[in-house]
Image (spheres, grey):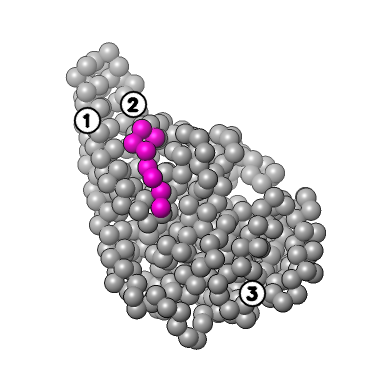
Amino acid sequence: MYLLRLILFILAAIGSAGYAFMYYGFIRYWNKANKRTKRNAIKYSQLSKPFAKFSIVIPCRNERNNIMSLLEDLIAQAYPSSQFEIIVADDNSGDDTAQLVQAFIAIHRNVQLKFIDKNEVNSTGLKYKKAALTAGVSQSKFDWVLTIDADVRLNVNWLQAWHVATVEQSDKYCITGPVLLNPALNRRQQIEQIEFMGLNAMAASLIEMKKPFLANGANFAVRRDIFNNVNGYAGNENIASGDDEFLMQKINHQFPNRIGFAMVQSALVSTPTQANMAKLLGQRRRWVSKSTKYAGKANTILLSAIWVYHLFLLLLLIFSIGDTNFFNGFALLLILKWVVEWIFLKKVALFYGVEIGRFNFMLGSFFHIIYVVFIGILGNIGSYNWKERKLKIR
């Protein structure tokens, strides 16, 4: 037993060193991106002409409780209404989402607002969200396509911020933006908010490293001509998840160093936390289900290494019970994990406008060890429920 514990400690220690080095990279490149944006803040603080033109594509399925609030946010934007259009694409809703959107269009004739019904969406030959997005892009008319989820909320300067982001990064073909889970009313939701914020900020750091990997389709921009050039979602059309990351990675493969992150606070969108643990696990299984489908090996290797590191930590915890020395060793490695994560998250929390409670952070980081191990397994077997659909993990 002693030898097993020693081996587990050595492996977990090696993994911890690699994990700390990875977070050093996240911290360094987050700071770099943030400093560059602040340097350009004065230069791009005012709206420059000509105004960027945006086609805002909203895929929606059973969003009767959210879509009206989002549409109100969009028509209230402090941005010339002639410079953007709104396209809502119905992903086979079973509620009255379609009727609500059509009624909104009838009232707001002065807004460039279009609705694509489920028959048009299904005619794309694709499935699920990718079908709705493809239908929306095919009927867009402006150079930049902004995709957002139907349950997000926007501040009035959101489009202005995206204008700044596209002007500041005029050489980019695809830009992903900041997303925050809000509101977070209880401890579980607060821990979920912290974890999600960290993932979103990692996307920015990885893009600054010129290794784009993570993205979020809830706040995502792509040039329409580039979307068509790479043939949209072809190649991963049968995967329910990954409309954002697979597209971004395809673009990066064909056009290296053309990926950006909208490091502008007003570009932030908020989206609700999951209502319960079952919905949270369904969402995360959906995310993990695409982890083995990436075109390049590097991303899969990185995810596997992170999973193995957490596995060794969990096994060390289990097998060190009853042995004070090895349990103390686990505690030291856990403290190292806390330190590097805390430094990173405290920096990014300033940008996202979030207060991080120490207890929630420490509790979440500890249970994250167990969560990563088990969601890594569950995300690659069986099936899960999402948006009133039962989807099989391929």
Point out the residue furthest to the top here. Answer: 322
Sequence-wise, which precedes: disc 1 or disc 2?
2
**Cα distance, mark 3 to mark 2?**
53 Å
- Range covered by the magenta-colored residues: 353-360
Identity of the residue furthest to the left in this view: 325
* Amino acid type, label 1: Leu
Above or below, comparing residue 104 to residue 352 in the picture: below
CA distance for labels 1 and 2: 15 Å
Closer mark to the observer between disc 1 and disc 2: 1
**Dot 2 amino acid type:** Leu
Q: Earlier in the sequence, mark 1 or mark 3?
A: 3
The dot on residue 379 is none
- Report the Cα–Cα distance between label 1 and label 3: 54 Å
90 versus 377 height, above or below:
below
Q: Is residue 94 left or right of residue 79?
A: right
Figure check: 343 above or below 218: above
Q: Residue 26 appears in which quarter of the rendering?
A: bottom left
Q: Residue at x 67, y 69 (%)?
A: 87
Under circle 2, the secondary element is helix
Instruction: Provide the residue designation for mark 1.
Output: 332
Residue 67 coordinates in the image, percent (x, y): 68, 57
> What secondary structure is marked by label 3?
strand
